[in-house]
Image: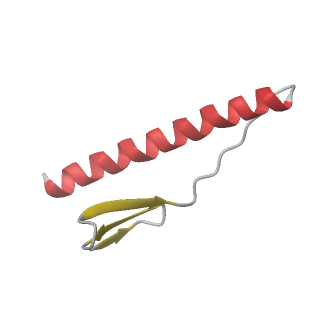
Amino acid sequence: MLLSDGEMTIEYDDEIQSYYIVCTRMAAAGLGKTKQEALADLREAAHFGIDTAVDLKLVEIGRKEG
């Protein structure tokens, strides 16, 4: 089974009997006065983006299966 909305692809692998998800189209930028600050900001932005995308997908799946 393949579900794709352009941002997340959800597939079931019969061999390992598990779902796996690939997230694409996720872009993040980090800003800071130093490289370290910019990287830390990038990490925070990326985590926020993934958390938001996963939360939205969970709501969507809940509605479809609900």
Quadrant of the rendered image containing residue 12: bottom left
Give x and y (percent) for residue 3: 33, 69
Q: What scheme was used to colour the molecule?
A: secondary structure
Measuring 54% from the left and 37% from the top, which residue is drawn there?
47
Direction from residue 24 to residue 36 in the image, left or right: right
**Where residue 52 sits in the image (x, y, percent)?**
45, 40
Most distant residue in the right direction: 33
For residue 24, above or below residue 27: below
User: Considering depth in this image, is 50 or 66 the residue closer to the camera?
Assistant: 50
Q: Residue furthest left?
A: 66
Residue 24: % across, % down: 54, 61
Q: Quadrant of residue 37?
A: top right
Q: Which residue is pictured at 70% across the width and 29% down the height?
A: 40
Q: Among all residues in the image, which is located at the extreme front?
A: 16
Quarter of the figure with residue 51: top left
- For image coordinates 49% across by 44% down, the residue present is 50
Q: Is residue 17 left or right of residue 46?
A: left
Q: How many marks?
A: 0
Q: Against 20, is 29 above or below?
A: above
Please indicate whether residue 36 sits to the left or right of residue 26 in the image: right
Quarter of the image with the N terminus is bottom left
Q: Give how far across and how far down residue 65 sits, in percent.
A: 15, 56
Write the residue at 29% across / 70% down.
13
Question: Which is nearer the eye, 1 or 14?
Answer: 14
